[in-house]
Image (cartoon, rainbow, N blue to C red):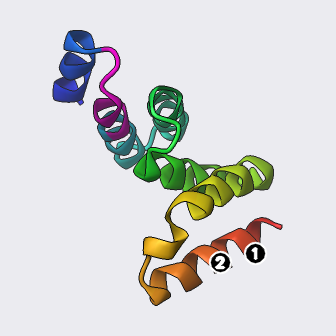
């Protein structure tokens, strides 16, 4: 996490550093911290796919279906056509689970 924090200090608009920090925090068990950093990544770059998808999954893990649905639908709107069929199906199933 220290490398991501240092990257953010050097460039507070570096969305990939926020995404990486979010991923590291989730792995460490800090889901709320992860969500905070993924939201910052999306604030900087609204169509940042990794962060949108991660936010959807994280909110789903917390049982927060409304925000999970919002982020997963944004991800789908931007990236669905580029996904392989298996990943399209998985995304559709996640979205259905949110409803």
Mark 2, other Cα within 10 Å: few <14 / some 14–19 / many ≥20 = some
| Residue projecting furthest to the right | 99
Looking at this view, is 99 or 77 the one in front?
Answer: 77
Callout 2 secondary element = helix
Looking at this view, is 93 or 34 the one in front?
Answer: 93
Asked whether 5 falls inside the magenta stretch, the response is no
Query: What range of the chain is rendered magenta?
Result: 12-19
Q: Quadrant of the C terminus?
A: bottom right
Callout 1 secondary element = helix
Whole-angstrom CA distance, mark 1 to mark 2, is: 6 Å
Q: Is residue 42 above or below residue 62?
A: above
For the point 80% across and 51% down, which residue is it?
Answer: 66
Residue 62: give x, y in percent of width and height: 66, 50
For the point 43% across and 73% down, which residue is it?
Answer: 82
Residue 99 appears anywhere in the view: yes
* Contact between labelled residues 2 and 1, with CB atoms less than 8 Å apart: yes
Residue 87: give x, y in percent of width and height: 47, 80
Q: Quadrant of the N terminus?
A: top left
Asked whether 15 falls inside the magenta stretch, the response is yes
Residue 60 appears anywhere in the view: no
For disc 2, the marked residue is: 92
Residue 43: give x, y in percent of width and height: 53, 27
For the point 73% across and 57% down, which residue is it?
Answer: 69
Q: Residue 96, which numbered label? A: 1
């Amino acid at each position: 996490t220290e490398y991501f924090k240092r990257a953010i200090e050097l460039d507070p608009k570096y969305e990939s550093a926020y995404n990486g920090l979010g991923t590291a925090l989730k792995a460490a068990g800090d889901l709320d911290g992860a969500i905070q950093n993924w939201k910052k990544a999306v604030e900087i770059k609204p169509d940042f796919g990794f962060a949108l998808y991660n936010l959807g999954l994280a909110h789903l893990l917390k049982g927060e279906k409304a925000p999970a649905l919002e982020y997963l639908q944004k991800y789908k709107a931007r990236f669905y056509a580029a996904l392989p069929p298996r990943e399209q199906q998985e995304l559709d199933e996640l979205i259905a689970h949110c409803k």
